[in-house]
Each structure stands twice: as C-alpha cells, then as structure tokens.
Image (cartoon, rainbow, N blue to C red):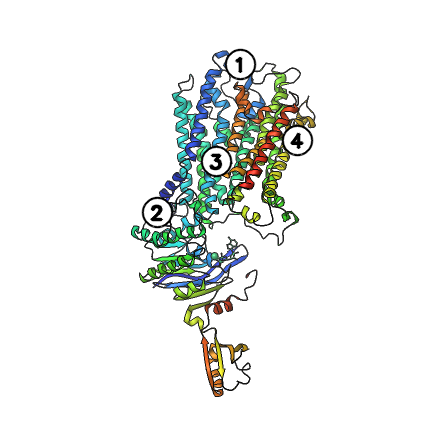
Amino acid sequence: MAEKRFNNTLPLLGMICRQERLQLPLWLAGLAGFTLIVAISFTNLYTNERELQEIAQSMINPAVTALVGPGYGIDNYTYGAMMAHQMLGMTALITGIMNILLITRHTRANEEDGRLEMIRSLPTGRLSNIGAAMLTAVIINLLLAVVIGFGLYTLQIESMEWEGSLLYGAALGAIGLFFAAVTGLLAQLSESARGVTGFSIGILLLAYAVRAIGDVSNETLSWLSPFGWVLGTEAYVNNYWWPIAVTLGTAVIVTVFAFYLNAIRDLEAGFVPSKPGRKHASFLLHHPFGLAFRLQRTGIIAWGAAMLMFGAMYGSVLGETESFFEEIDMLQEFIQPEAGYSITEQFLTMLMAVMAMASTIPGVMAMMRLKAEEKKERSENLLSLAVSRNKLMGSYALLALLHGFIMLSLAGLGMGLAGNAVMEESLSVWGFYEAAVVYLPAMWIMIGMALFFIGLSPAFAGVTWAYLLYSFIVVYLGGLFQFPDWVTNLTPFGHIPQLPVEDFKLAAAAGLTGIAIILAAAGFISYNRRDIEG
Amino acid sequence: MTVLQTKQLTKKFGSFTALDGVDIQVNQGEVYGFIGPNGAGKSTTIRILLGMMKATQGEAEIFGKDAWRKAVDIHRDIAYVPGDLNLWPNLTGGEVIDLFGKLRGNMNQEKREKLLRRFDLDPEKKCRTYSKGNRQKVALVSAFATDADLYILDEPTSGLDPLMECIFQESVLEAKQEGKSILLSSHILSEVEQLCDRVGIIRDGKMIETGTLQELRHLTRTSIYLETKQPVPALAEQGGVHNLEIKEDGVSFQIDTEYMDSLFQYVSGFGIVKLESAPPTLEDLFMRHYEGTSEGGPS
Ligand SMILES: Nc1ncnc2c1ncn2[C@@H]1O[C@H](COP(=O)(O)OP(=O)(O)OP(=O)(O)O)[C@@H](O)[C@H]1O
Ligand SMILES: [Mg+2]
C-alpha cells in the first residue's frame, strides 16, 4: 500500500495493552465470573426436571420476553436453555458497554486530548491508531468468547455441552465486536468523546429496545437488532452459527466504513460542521448552575426522549402481558402473586425498578460531570472567580437531582400513558407515576454517593457505577434467585416499596433520604477541605 | 536543496478561508522562522505539512514527497513538537519518549540521556504529574533525541523557563550545525532573532513577507537620537520622519530606511554634536506587520 495506512499499528497496539493492563482484565474477570457463577447457581436453585419446567412456564410471557429475550427450548427447559434465555441478552448488553468505553478511550478521547496529533506526527499510518484500537477489541472479545465458552463447558453441567458453550461465548464476542465497530464509526462522526459514548450507548439501548418490541409483537423487527441476532443463535437448543457470521460480517462492514471516513477526514474534525455560536452569553450563563445545565443540555433532551420511549415501550408490553395471562391461568414462581393484585401489576413493579435504575444513570452522570470538569482543569476557572466550592458543587447536585427527577417522571408517565391505553384493568396514569417517583430516595442515595466520592477524592467516584451495577443485578435477578436478604438489603432499590402491590412505607423513604443527606453533607464538607486536582 | 515547500496552499473550513495561497520554502540546513499573529494560520499550515489535514488546494511537499499521501515515509525523518502536548496520564515521561523513539525508529540513546540531563527532566514521573513546562520538555527531548532531517516546531517553548529556553536554543543550533533543517513557529521574538536564518510572516492566511532578517529590517524604520549645534528647522516636514519628539538637548525620531541618506545630508549642515541610531527592533518590525489584523479574519 503506497500510503502505508497501517504503518506501526503493532507498537500502538502494545501501547494500548499497556494502558489497559488493569481495566480490561477486570472487565473480563467480571463478565466471565458472573456468567459462571450464575450457571452454577442455576443447578443449585433448580434441582430436578419438574422445577425446571415450572420456571420455564413462569418465564414465558411478554414482560419477561421484553426484558431478557424470547425463550427457546421451553418444552425441554435445560440448564443450557435457561442460561441462553435468561442471561445471554443482559450479558451481551454489558459486553456492548465495555466495548463502547474501550473504543472511545482510544479513538476520539485520544484525539480530543491532542495525543493523536503527536502520534500522527510519527511514522504511523492514518489508520494505525483506530486499527490498533479495533485490534484490541478483537483480542479482548476473542478472549471473552474463549474464556466464557471453555468456562461454561468445563463446569460440566448437564446439557451445557461443548458446541452450545462455545456458541454462547461466541455470541458475546460477536456482539462486543459489533459495538466496537459502531463506536469506531461514531468516533469519526462526532467531535467529542462524550458525544461518541453518548450516541453509542443510545444506539445500544435502542437496539435492545427494538429487540424487545420485536420479540413481543413482531419477530421480523427483532432481526433488525444485533441483539436479535445473537439471541437467535438459540445456544444450547439449536446451536445456529449463522447469526454469529451475520453479526461479525456487519461489524466488518461498519469497521471498513469507519476506516474509510477516518482516512479521508482531517485530524480532530468530525463530519458535522460546527456553526458560529452566540456572541454574548444568554441569561443562563450568569450562574454556575446555568453553566452546568448548558453543558449538559443536549444530553438532558436526549435522555428525556429516550426515557419517555423506554417507559412507553414497557407500558405497551403490559397490555400484551395482561392478555397473555388471561389465556393461560397458571401460578408463577417468577413473581409470587399477592392477593388482590394481578400478575401484570406485579410485572409492573419489576419494570418500574428497572426504569428507576435507568433514570438514575443520567442523574449520576450529571453529578459526575463535576469530576470531569475538575480533571480537565475547568473547575479551576470558576473557582478562581467569585464562586465558592459549595456553590459549584451545589449547582451540579441540584442539576443532578432535577435531571434524575425529570427522567423518572418521564419514564413513569410514558409507561402510565401507554399502559393505561393498552390494559383493560389498569391503574390510573397517576398510579403509574406514583409507582415511579417512589424510587426517588434510592436515586438520591446514588447521587449522594457520587457527590460523596467527588468530595472525598474523584479517583474513587467510579465506585458509584459499580454500586449501581450491583443494584441492577440484584434487583433484576432478584426474582429468579432467592438471594439472601442481606444481598438485597445492600442496595437502596431493595428497600423501596413496590407500588401498587406493596404499601408506601414512610419510614423506609425517610431513612433512605436521611442517608442521602448524610452522604451529601459529608461530600460537601470534604470538597471544601481537599485540593482541587488538575 | 529544498526540504519543505508549499505552493499556493489553501485551506477552507466550511466557508471560512484559513489559508489563502501560502508559499513557503525551507532549504536544507536553515532555520526558518514562521511567525504571525494569533489565528493567522501557522498551526493549520503545519498540520497540513504533517498530513493531518488535507489541503483544499495547492501543494505541500516535504523531501519532495506529497505531505498527505506520503505522510508515513516523511515522518520517519522528521520530528514534531506541538505547543501544547497532552500525554497519557498513567505512563511515565520516559515511557512516552521511548514509545515515540521506537515508532520513529531512529532514536539515539546517548542523546536521549544527554538531553534528559540537560533539560533536567525526571523520566520516572507519571505524565499526570508533570507541570506544563515539563510536559513540553518530554516532547523536546523526544524530538532532539532523534536523528531527524527536519524539525517542525510549533511554539515549542511555551511554558519553558528562561534557562530552559536557552538550552532549547542551543539544541536548535546544534541540530543546525549537523546540517538539519528547522521550521520554527514562535511568538518569542528574541528566539526568532537568535535562531532564524530566514523568516516568513503570515497574516490572515496570507504570506505577507519573506526574507532574511536583514532584508526585512530594510522595510522598517531606524530610531535616531540627534543633538545639533543649531536647531534643525522643519525637521518634521522632511520625508520619512516619524514620531518626532523634542528632548532636553536634542530630538528623537524614526526614519524610513529609504530616506536615511537625504535626511542626513540635510541635518549635517546644522552641526551634529551627537548621533545615536538604534536598529529597528524585531518588535517594531512585527508590530507594523501584525497591526491591522481584522478581527474576524478574511473571508
Ligand atoms: N478545525 C477548524 N475549524 C474551523 N476553523 C479553524 C479550525 N482550525 C483552525 N481554524 C481557524 O483557522 C485560523 C488559523 O488557525 P491556526 O491555528 O492555524 O492559527 P495560528 O496561526 O496557529 O495561531 P496561534 O498563534 O494562536 O497558534 C483561525 O482563525 C482558526 O480559528
Ligand atoms: Mg498555533
């Protein structure tokens, strides 16, 4: 090749591996460990054929299908079929996130910070950097596929044979590569790393939502989503390999397109031209709160639209669930029916918990922005003016609270409006809304925790995400596994009364709010005492 | 021999013209100073020369090779120092220098050690903890430790202390003695004066002047302090005289170079007691060229 577009890719790959020597092994261990532990616990939870069939019956309804995907091999619900049904979709989602973060770090973030300029002044090809990033993704996803594939097989669980296990691993690796490619493409289009992550995660969630709607209402739709493809492998049941080929093929095409765009564009440019902005600051920018809002405006609008859609989507699934249960009247283990409430309403509470946690993400992100600003040495700019630390941190905290509240409200309303429209015996829209906002105290704890760590030391702020992920797994899987009480008690989301099935508990709400206030107060105090880092 | 050349280089960002027919030529073994006001287009030109941006029109060549298509080949023999360098927070300065050296493939270990000592840089610190000046030193050490043929330096000394500035100048002169060529963009005029053989001035994306410092000085005024036995009548009305000021014992003014001769013939008739002439400072020269920059640039 005359232009030597990939010159020196391998040394850059080595460089990326050096930088990732901690992060990627942690992701790998986490994903693989989680998968294997769940597989083992299935064998402990369900010890005989009858129990397996019971759980199979409880899993086949539109609400569960929307959440985890369609089940295959239901009439012979083996451990393998159960794994592929209940775990593959969600693990694929997390694998996607790992890849999005990885590729953004080494493409647009590198470029935005000016490091790529230096690399490009060396005898490296135009595509060497993105090539090295994609190679890293290939390696980590291959490792993931192999470790999980072999790992599942070596557990020697009945029905989890060789081919199915490998296919299970391959499905994860393939979806990982797919989202690595998508992120690589978006890194060419958007000029900021934040934009790349935001849009990529947006596409990830959209793809998951398309699959959910498709699986419930129209199967063809599911085939438009990469999640539909990897779940369509029917691992452990029919073991189709061709969806893997489709996923990888698409990933290759997307990658080639990303490479092409990378090769023709200017360094640090995107494909969306920037237009001249305002000459003077609008009234918003007269206060740090206004600045915090202005910086995140696009994100707030995008998240708002997404949460409304997300809510409406699950709301409409409730209608399907209701009619489904009218046809088959069978008692479920998945959700213990409580007197006086329909099974559909109990699904509602589970979906609400998921949406509450989804709404917490933007709230915590808004708080975390303070940490990013500090890291880029922009907090200094404000603090050197007549802005106190309390005012700065308070502005971000207020924005985070409002942001989270609005997102939760939109999700609740979306679900209420759609659910109310499709269900025959339904709660009022207000009832839905109540069931959503009751989660506010749990959200406050998460935001308070982010605030606490930012105050203490920004380096630890990531713990908040780990805690949210823990909460998600516990609540999401709480219906499946009988976790010990303390496991559920460790997450604030486990203490929220599940309206309308349970009654509102003032004590719980007050307790959680109290903890949030204590965390926040501690955060403010230490933020005032510590050094501002650069 | 020409090492670097642009011909009618033009770059547009949307409808905004950042570069408008820029011609530059750097010859082997010379230090070329590339100067101009903020936003004039220096960094844009350099990024095109490095193959990071594609010219809208015109040619950019280094070592006779196209800067965009042959970027990799060219980069083997050049070293670039940007004005603001962000490094990987979790790698040490030493690691970064070695990485750059390995990629360029022509690092001189001896020079590396020597430069680390000279620039007083601790290579064991993580880049996250370097000060602005120390980050800059990482780039400088890495550049001068390579046996490159051409050095492209874009405000390389921003953030350096005066002692380090001196060491930087030594390093440039050493490279020049070895027959290397250097393109130096800088706002520090003393640096340009000390180092550059030729200077090109760019403003609003157009080259407005090129030449040796000597040649450029001719374009400007000399400051004169003069005492005469009898007062000189109608001095202000003489051609080429500017900024006349009456001092205690004499006068001070500035004179356009081309009027020097006629003026001194005129004043010599009044009995010169004392005459001091100061060559035009580079500042004067640049001020004259930089002024009149329209705010929004050309369009
Ligand atoms: N990616 C871009 N998009 C739009 N305009 C740009 C872009 N990059 C540079 N410009 C514009 O091109 C002009 C030249 O910029 P350049 O960075 O080359 O200036 P410079 O001479 O290096 O200035 P300085 O002395 O401040 O470093 C400026 O007006 C700048 O705003
Ligand atoms: Mg510049």
Disc 2 to disc 1, how far (Cα)? Answer: 62 Å
Disc 4 to disc 1, how far (Cα)? Answer: 34 Å
Q: Is residue A369 among what the camera can see? A: no
Ligand 1: does it lie within 8 Å of the C-beta at label 4?
Answer: no
Question: Closest to the observer: B288 or A146?
Answer: B288
Reading the image, the residue beneath label 1 is A54
For marks 4 and 3, the one nearer the N-term is 3
Chain under label 2? B
Question: Mark 2 near mark 3, Cβ–Cβ under 8 Å?
Answer: no
Question: Mark 2 near mark 1, Cβ–Cβ under 8 Å?
Answer: no
Reading the image, the residue beneath label 4 is A413
> As displayed, is residue A478 above or below residue A523?
above
Chain under label 1? A
Chain under label 4? A
Amino acid carrying label 1: it is Glu
Question: Mark 2 near mark 4, Cβ–Cβ under 8 Å?
Answer: no
Question: Closest to the observer: A382 or A482?
Answer: A382
Disc 4 to disc 3, how far (Cα)? Answer: 31 Å
The residue positioned farthest toward the bottom in the image shown: B269
Q: Secondary structure at mark 1?
A: helix
Amino acid carrying label 3: it is Phe
